[in-house]
Amino acid sequence: MDEKARLVVTTEESCERYDTGTSSPGRWTRRQVCSAVIGIAVVVIVTVILAAGIGSKTRGSNGDGIGHKPDTGSSILPPPRSRSRSLPPSLAYPGAPLLVARPLTFLAVGDWGRAGDYNQSDVARAMGDVAASRGGVDFVISTGDNFYPAGLAHADDANFSISFSDMYTSASLQRPWFVVLGNHDYRGDPSIQTGGALTTRDWRWRCNRTFEVRRDLCAESALQDADDRAIRAEEERPSPSPGQSECNATVSIFFIDTSPFSLEYSDAAEMNWFVDRVDLEADNSRLLTQLAEKLKAAENDTWRIVVGHHPLYSSSCPLGTPGLTERLLPILERGAVDLYINGHDHDLEHVKKGFSPVHMLTTGAGSQLNDVWLPVDDDYLFRLQGNGFLYVDVDAYRIRSDFYDVRGKVVHSFEVVK
């Protein structure tokens, strides 16, 4: 007997249990009971379909920011969601059913390491709450300036525990942290953060001057690759089952050390540790060439994201990073980069220049805030002089970015769709 037949029999049998066999006042016949059951089922099904249709038309909107109206419902955190989605036909090889998409989610925060001061502990708590409410994250990104005021002095530096291990304690934040260096990290010994010793103190810590994280958005696998130091965790991608097609959707995230490019810092005393050990211009050229080559190799990826410490454009003086913007931005544009995520400026910003396809996102509000803002043009889609962080959700057909404030409220959202 097939499934539909079994369902029919079950319904009829349940009706018979309520049928006395003889119609009498105050009692229902089998026909009446069956009609009532079927009517209730129809009402429930129609209600569910209507609710699903309404929900599918609801999209996140921009909250408080330049030129945007507040989202009156954005203070309510979204419920946990499914960790898998179906793919549109354009993103799978033709000729067979589709594999299920696996979304990638992460948080990004920068300029945070102040022993809990300047609202760092409040931001950490909000990060944990948001990550938990949204069903967890795959990892956390730090956009640099990890330890104030002068990085770490040695591998046993207490500031590592105070500002990191004992600060981001929420269960939802017990995920890998992918970390870049900021200019304040160079005031100490940056090799302490990149050399691997800190990972023995806290397994989450993954820091290097340049590395790559790559994710297959379709299968239950992930590939993380590093330059100069092995932080690779690799799983074999499962083969499609008979009759299935292989999904074709991936995201690559490239991390780069931007402090040596900044004219403000490259000849400053805080960079002496580094400048005394390398040919600065040769090293900068090597990093740029390497990034361009990696972006070229990733040209078939669905999404490309680059993470650095310094902004390419900023509403804080000097409206960008001289020495970096003119060299890095053309590489990002040629490499069809979708997002550039940075810190350094102690605020939250979304910049989209009309001449560039790259969305530039500043998330440097993990603790102390900026006190200087300059007038900006319409290319600055959002800025908030308040504490907060960034949440990014990537799947096979779109990237959604949500800026959260310290209260766990969404203050700005946008999507990039392919």
Image (cartoon, rainbow, N blue to C red):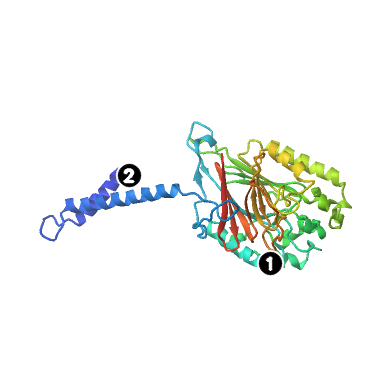
Give the numbered dot on residue 118: 1
Q: Please, is residue 224 above or below residue 92 in the view?
A: below
Q: Quadrant of residue 205?
A: bottom right
Please tell me how many numbered marks the rendered image carries: 2
Regarding residue 182, the answer to whether it shows in the image is yes
Residue 24's spot in the image, x, y percent?
Answer: 10, 58
Residue 390's spot in the image, x, y percent?
Answer: 62, 54
Q: Are marks 1 and 2 in contact (CB under 8 Å)?
A: no
Q: Nearer the viewer, mark 1 or mark 2?
A: 1
Q: Residues within 10 Å of mark 2 (few under 14, many from 20)?
A: few
Residue 115's spot in the image, x, y percent?
Answer: 71, 68
Give amino acid for label 2: Glu
Q: Please, is residue 243 above or below residue 221 in the view?
A: above
For mark 1, give the secondary structure. Answer: loop
Residue 56's spot in the image, x, y percent?
Answer: 44, 47
Q: Nearer the viewer, residue 394 or 230?
A: 394
For mark 2, give the secondary structure. Answer: helix
Q: Nearer the viewer, residue 205 or 286?
A: 286
- Position of the C terminus, as image quadrant, is top right
**From the viewer's perspective, is 285 left or right of 391?**
right
Q: Quadrant of residue 287?
A: top right
Residue furthest top in the image: 95
**From the viewer's perspective, is 281 left or right of 292?**
right
Q: Quadrant of residue 2?
A: top left
Q: Residue at x 70, y 56 (%)?
A: 373
Q: CA distance from mark 1 to mark 2?
A: 61 Å
Give amino acid for label 1: Tyr
Residue furthest front in the image: 375
Residue to which mark 2 is pinned: 3
Q: Residues within 10 Å of mark 1 (few under 14, many from 20)?
A: some
Regarding residue 219, the answer to whether it shows in the image is no
